[in-house]
């Protein structure tokens, strides 16, 4: 018998601290596998945010740093410009990236920093207990939107791929879904493509992953996935929003 | 030693940092230190280093966190409001035991204040301006030469104790020009490969983790005590001050630092000609503060006068140093006003008679 | 004869989320009666013969708890 699938060396042996059925773990696996398959575990530097993934420095087996809330793209800028030979990636949730870290995200993208940003969108602040995030859907309840998000009062869900795609410089911007095994296999391709682009020094890679939050949505993992497919994917359509590599190929 | 060059403080400290081996600089424009970032924009690329203007001071200090985490000699600079924005980042850099240099060319405050020189960020600098139990060494120059010399010194202290170091200057020191001489050689950087990220490690690969999150209170308590053991070492080895006109027993002791101390020296000299003996104790490290030196200098004096460009901050440390053993007084200017020598001479004469 | 396969679900990691059960096209995974050390019902393979080693359970698992072997 030969092994056809097992836990990747890109992850440590630590037990993940995410809730049962939370798709953060899937995102971790795709990144860990991609690092292992590309042979870059020893030259990658990962950045853990503040949020559910704050303990990511215990989960990825490459060099890791935990940074202030929202500032991962700025720290990544300092890391990348200090060690251009390293593959630098940030791993951030929607509060970290789209709320407090919006400016850092937009400017790192605008500078086409040679980093990969993994953006886990589950429409809520998970770690702190289910508060409204910039990506919370219209009418969706959260502990700080107890009557459902009122877009007139708090604005509508922030579409980060579409927003960043208006910038001229970022290299690759895509949104993928983790809501089914088929989607997960497609998402893996995007993760590897982003790392390869970094290895080729192409610049800013943005991979948004639609995920679930069973605990704070008050659903079991399966129902949470269904809800996300019905409610989130229409608001956050998966797809490639910018690919300067493809644009160049078409042009040549 | 090189020959004398007439330079602005802002440019002198930038040149000294580059000569000392700083190859990474991230900052944001703000008067009165914009010449520093402009100088780095011109010179850092020529030195083969990394210069980047960040989108905010918050982003800049986090870029410094990233470069420091890789073991790079990295610096940032700003002025008062910008330094306020950097405090969370500085707390992280201190907690993560990373070397870095932060230059504060202070301006009028609070709020937007103005662009005149001031020393009102003393508490912020010396009491750990961000959250949590930590301090940063604080170096306070009072001449362009001293300002320049503090760049290599700050890096050495930062690397020896693995801590961020603050250079506590002001708009006057930043903007004025004085002759500067640069040394021929500088101490090499201390090898960071034992802890830095992204360092190649032969043999069995174990990843480096830089982190300041310790959910278990007992572990955070222990980590904090390790940090404070370093602070004890800094207190033992790094306290610096200048004793001026203290060879004979003065009747009045003045404690003052930075630009304010320059004016005090003029007053001390003027009063000496009138036969009024006034001594000056000028703290150069504001943290660790020279408590013992102040107490010793104050022996036998009638009064200890603290002179600052703020409403009274360092004067609290002076009172701590004296612990009630001597009468104290405070004279300060706010709003970015600076004493004239004549004005200060008259004030001190009043205390001496 | 279909190739022999073996599914190993590591109880240390399994949180009983059930996503692998949903993913298995052969319905050969189910919750165990017992609880693991974390207090979850771990998943186990109830019909190794039916399993084709397609690895969809591995793909769906958020905790990388599953190892799949195949001849």
Image (cartoon, helix red, strand yellow):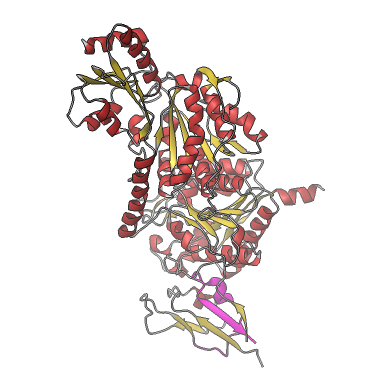
Q: Is residue C49 magenta?
A: yes
Q: Which residue lies furthest to the right in this view?
A: A252
Q: In which quarter of the image is the N terminus of chain B?
A: top right
Q: Measured along the vertical axis of the image, is residue C21 above or below residue B54?
A: below
Provide residue B279's location: percent of width, then percent of height: 30, 19
Inspect the magenta stretch and tell me whether residue B80 lies in it: no
- Whole-percent x, y for residue B307 in the image: 30, 20
Near-viewer residue (B243 or B57): B243
Q: Give the range drawn in magenta.
A: C46-71
Give the residue at the far bottom of this rendering: C1
Q: Is B230 in front, or is A156?
A: B230
Inspect this view and state whether residue B112 appears. yes
**Residue A75 location in percent, x, y?**
52, 46
Image quarter of residue B197: bottom right
Q: Which of B131 and C10 is in front in this view?
A: B131
Q: Magenta stretch: dominant SS?
A: loop
Q: How many labels does the image show?
A: 0
Q: Would residue A114 appear left or right of B213 to someone viewing this image?
A: right
């Amino acid at each position: 018998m030969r092994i056809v699938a097992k836990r990747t060396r890109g992850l440590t042996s630590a037990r993940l601290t995410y809730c049962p059925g939370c798709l953060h773990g899937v995102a971790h696996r795709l990144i860990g596998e991609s690092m292992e398959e590309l042979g870059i575990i020893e030259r990658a530097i990962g950045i853990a945010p503040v949020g559910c993934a704050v303990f990511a420095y215990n989960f990825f087996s490459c060099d890791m740093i935990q940074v202030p809330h929202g500032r991962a793209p700025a720290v990544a800028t300092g890391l990348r410009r200090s060690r251009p030979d390293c593959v630098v990636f940030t791993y951030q949730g929607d509060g970290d990236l789209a709320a407090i870290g919006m400016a850092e995200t937009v400017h790192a993208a605008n500078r086409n920093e040679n980093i990969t940003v993994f953006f886990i969108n589950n429409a809520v602040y998970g770690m702190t207990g289910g508060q409204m995030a910039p990506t919370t859907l219209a009418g969706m309840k959260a502990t700080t939107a107890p009557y459902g998000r009122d877009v007139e009062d708090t604005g509508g869900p922030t579409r980060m791929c579409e927003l960043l795609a208006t910038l001229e410089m970022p290299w690759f911007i895509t949104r993928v879904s983790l809501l089914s095994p088929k989607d997960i296999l497609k998402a893996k391709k995007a993760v590897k493509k982003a790392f390869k682009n970094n290895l080729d020094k192409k610049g800013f890679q943005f991979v948004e992953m639609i995920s679930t939050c069973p605990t704070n949505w008050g659903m079991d993992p399966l129902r949470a996935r269904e809800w996300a497919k019905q409610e989130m994917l229409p608001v956050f359509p998966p797809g490639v929003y910018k690919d300067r590599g493809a644009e160049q190929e078409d042009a040549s | 030693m090189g020959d004398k060059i007439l330079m602005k403080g802002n440019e002198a400290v930038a040149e000294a940092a580059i000569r000392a081996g700083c190859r990474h600089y991230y900052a944001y424009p703000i008067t009165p230190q914009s010449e520093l970032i402009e100088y780095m924009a011109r010179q850092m690329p020529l030195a083969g280093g990394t210069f980047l203007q960040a989108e905010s001071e918050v982003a800049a200090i986090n870029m410094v966190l990233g470069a420091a985490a890789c073991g790079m000699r990295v610096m940032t600079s700003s002025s008062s409001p910008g330094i306020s924005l950097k405090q969370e980042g500085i707390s992280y850099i201190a907690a993560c035991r990373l070397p870095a240099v932060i230059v504060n060319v202070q301006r009028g405050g609070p709020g937007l204040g103005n662009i005149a020189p001031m020393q009102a960020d003393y508490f912020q600098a010396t009491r750990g301006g961000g959250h949590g139990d930590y301090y940063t060494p604080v170096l306070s120059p009072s001449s362009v030469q001293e300002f320049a010399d503090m760049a290599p010194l700050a890096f050495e202290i930062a690397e020896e104790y693995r801590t961020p170091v603050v250079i506590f200057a002001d708009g006057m020191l930043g903007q004025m020009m004085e002759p500067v001489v640069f040394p021929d050689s500088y101490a090499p950087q201390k090898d960071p490969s034992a802890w830095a990220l992204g360092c190649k490690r032969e043999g069995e690969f174990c990843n480096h983790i830089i982190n300041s999150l310790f959910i278990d209170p007992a572990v955070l308590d222990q980590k904090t005590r390790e940090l404070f053991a370093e602070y004890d070492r800094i207190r033992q080895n790094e306290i610096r001050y200048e004793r001026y006109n203290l060879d004979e027993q003065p009747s009045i002791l003045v404690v003052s630092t930075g630009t304010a101390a320059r004016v005090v020296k003029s007053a001390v000299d003027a009063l000496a000609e009138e036969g009024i003996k006034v001594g000056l104790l000028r703290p150069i490290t504001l943290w660790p503060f020279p408590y013992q030196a102040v107490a010793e200098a104050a022996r036998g004096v009638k009064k200890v006068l603290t002179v600052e460009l703020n409403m009274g901050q360092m004067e609290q440390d002076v009172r701590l140093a004296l612990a009630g053993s001597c009468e104290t007084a405070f004279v300060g200017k706010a709003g970015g006003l600076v004493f004239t020598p004549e004005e200060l001479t008259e004030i001190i004469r009043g205390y001496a008679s | 004869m279909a190739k022999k396969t073996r599914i190993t679900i590591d109880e240390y990691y399994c949180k009983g989320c059930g996503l692998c059960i949903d993913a298995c096209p052969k319905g050969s995974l189910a919750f165990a009666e017992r609880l693991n050390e974390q207090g979850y019902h771990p998943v186990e393979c109830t019909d190794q013969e039916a399993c084709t080693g397609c690895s969809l359970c591995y793909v769906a698992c958020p905790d990388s708890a599953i190892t799949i072997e195949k001849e």
